[in-house]
Image: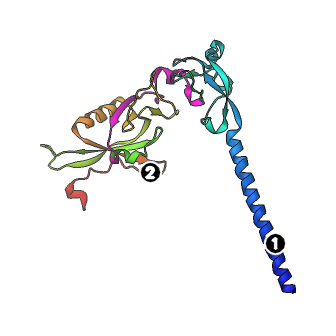
Amino acid sequence: MNRRVILLVAALVTAALGTALVVAYVNRAEETALIGQAPVEVLMATEAIPVGATGLAVTEAGSVELRTLPAASVPPGALSDLTPVLDQVTITSVFPGQVLLAPMFGTERQASRGLALPEGTMAVAVQLGDPQRVAGFVRPGSEVAVFVTTAATATESQTSTSLLLERVPVVAVGTATAEGATSGSPPEQIPTTILTLALTQEQAQKVILSTSSAAMYFALLDTQSAVDDTAPGTTVDRLLS
């Protein structure tokens, strides 16, 4: 008899515990759903804002207004106040109905050139296939080593693959830049197979010539990558040596 009582009590305790866990799970799920539906105030453009407009000018012109949206529908970087960007300018066109994002603002230099380039460099774009651009893993802000494969010539008896540029920055992939915005007003639909590099004039000349007379291949680098610009080019003769 005592054994039956003990089993009955254990069953009731187990059932109560299971019910409590289910209730707790449901409450957490409801809380998560409510967080996503919680109202958030963000700034939305009420009229077109051109490239180069300061945050202060946008505020004074009344080109934006606060709108209340569900938190789940608000994109990352959405602004509810232009105070942090009053001295910055729009680096991409903003259209009516767009939520204002922090990456839409930058420096005068970014707005005038469309790209933020290291001093003394110029932007050169090249189009590559999927393997040649590291299967799409190259992103704005990445650094790449550039290799070229040249055909046999009168002075070179064999096809050869060599390092062309040791380490160069990628400033854009398609129209996406490291600042998270797109360049242009309005931005063109540029395929992500087109990569834009920041190069010196000498580097630019090498890359431009390689696009028409050689096959280019990018290697994605990190801070630990070792690149030897003194290594000889690889030919069929050297391939297995």
**Near-viewer residue (232 or 207):** 207
Q: Is residue 230 left or right of residue 39?
A: left
Q: Residue at x 77, y 63 (%)?
A: 19
Q: Is residue 27 left or right of residue 144?
A: right
CB contact under 8 Å: marks 1 and 2:
no
Image quadrant where residue 67 sits: top right
How many residues crowd around disc 2 within 10 Å: few (fewer than 14), some, or many (20 or more)?
Answer: few
The kind of residue on which mark 1 rests is Leu
Q: Nearer the viewer, mark 1 or mark 2?
A: 1
How many residues crowd around disc 1 within 10 Å: few (fewer than 14), some, or many (20 or more)?
Answer: few
Q: Residue at x 83, y 83 (%)?
A: 4
Name the disc covering residue 188, or none: none
Q: Mark 2 highlights which residue?
A: 225
Q: Position of residue 132 (x, y in %)?
A: 33, 46
User: Is 60 situated above or below 69?
Assistant: above
Tell me where the magenta segment starts and ends, as one range: 102-131
Name the disc covering residue 12, or none: 1
Q: Is residue 108 magenta?
A: yes
Q: Residue at x 41, y 47 (%)?
A: 220
Q: Position of residue 140 (x, y in %)?
A: 46, 38
